[in-house]
Every structure is written in C-alpha cells, then in structure tokens.
Amino acid sequence: MVFRAWTDPEQLKHWYAPDGCTIEYKHIDVREGGTFHSCIHDPIHGDCWITGTYQEVTVPEKLLFTMVLSDETGADVSSRNAGKPEEWPERLVTTVTFEPAGQQTKVSIHQTVSEEEAKKTGAYQSWIKMFNKLDQMLGK
C-alpha cells in the first residue's frame, strides 16, 4: 500500500508536495528507465520544475530515481539559476526503501545532498511535511 502511494500518479497528487503546495505531472512512468517531469506549485516561492529517471524499481522494496531542476519544457536548469546554494548538486539521486514493521511500513529516504544544505533550503522540512501528508492519506 505504501509503495503504491509512491508509484501511483493519482495518489502522488494528494501528498507529494509540502503543505500549501500542489504537484502536477506532465508525465510519469514508474518503471526502470522510466521518466517523470513534475512541478511543485508553491504560492509563496513559485514553481519548481523537476525531471528525473527511475533507475531502480523493486516492488515493494525500493525506488531509486534522479532529480534534476528543469523548466516547464523539461530543459535542465542549473541549481544556481534556480536559486539553490552553490553547494547544491546539479543532479540528486533519491533512494527510498520500504521495510515491513509489523502492521506498518518503515520508509527511509536518502538523497545525495547534505542534510545541512537540505535544512538550509527547506527541502528537509518539505520531506517531513510530505511524509505527514502521506501518513494521513494512508491512515484513512
């Protein structure tokens, strides 16, 4: 159920954006080699377009995908031009693992950006808010 929430575009629309924001997908193909192009619409900070590729999809244990800042057409945008700090990587790799924990699922996430940078930019806090939304959605 939790893995499906990470791979079903209809479910992602309900939780995969921080509080007050929405997400749209120009396309999403969750399979190894599949790609996505999404935008988080933030009424305060503006739009954040991302493209990525699913490098590993192991049902129901693991997702590994890249994330690259882009524009609405899908063209790459440098981190600096997108307003990120100098230390922000041009290409993030995100690994999400899912482990049974009794009647629940333990979800772990790792990204190739330092925790310090993630906290400075708000990315860290955004993940916490999104996990809370996911928990609420699945708890219904």
Image (spheres, rainbow, N blue to C red):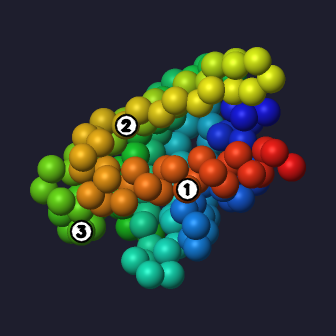
Name the side, left or right, on which 42 lies relative to 24. Answer: left
Picture quarter containing residue 111? top left
Residue that numbered label 2 is attached to: 111
Q: Is residue 113 visible?
A: yes
78 vs 94: above or below: below
Type of the residue with mark 2: Gln
User: For the residue carrying disc 1, how many other residues have a C-alpha within 10 Å: few (<14), some (14-19), or many (20+)?
Assistant: some
Query: Counting other residues with Cα less than 10 Å from the Cα at mark 3, is it few (<14), some (14-19), or many (20 or more)?
Result: few
Marks 2 and 1, how far apart at CA: 16 Å
Question: Can residue 57 be seen at all in this image of the molecule?
Answer: no
Circle 2/circle 1 CB separation < 8 Å:
no
- Seen from the viewer's position, the closer of residues 94 and 52 is 94
Image location of residue 123, percent across then percent down:
39, 55
Of the numbered discs 2 and 3, the one sitting upstream in the chain is 3
Considering only order in the chain, which callout, 1 or 2, is on the residue closer to the N terminus?
Answer: 2
Residue at position x 30%, y 36% in the image: 112
Which residue extends farthest left? 86
Asked if residue 117 lies left or right of residue 48, the reply is left
Q: Position of residue 42 (x, y in %)?
A: 49, 74
The image shows residue 126 at horizontal and vertical percentages of 47, 57
The residue identified by callout 3 is 83
Q: Which residue is mark 1?
A: 129
**Tag 1, which secondary structure?**
helix
Identify which residue, 3 or 39, lies in the foreground: 3
Residue situated furthest front in the rendering: 102
For numbered disc 2, what is the local secondary structure? strand
Q: Is residue 53 left or right of residue 21?
A: left
Question: Does 59 appear above or below 132?
Answer: above
The crowding category of the residue bearing disc 2, from other C-alpha atoms within 10 Å (few below 14, some 14 to 19, many at least 20), is: some
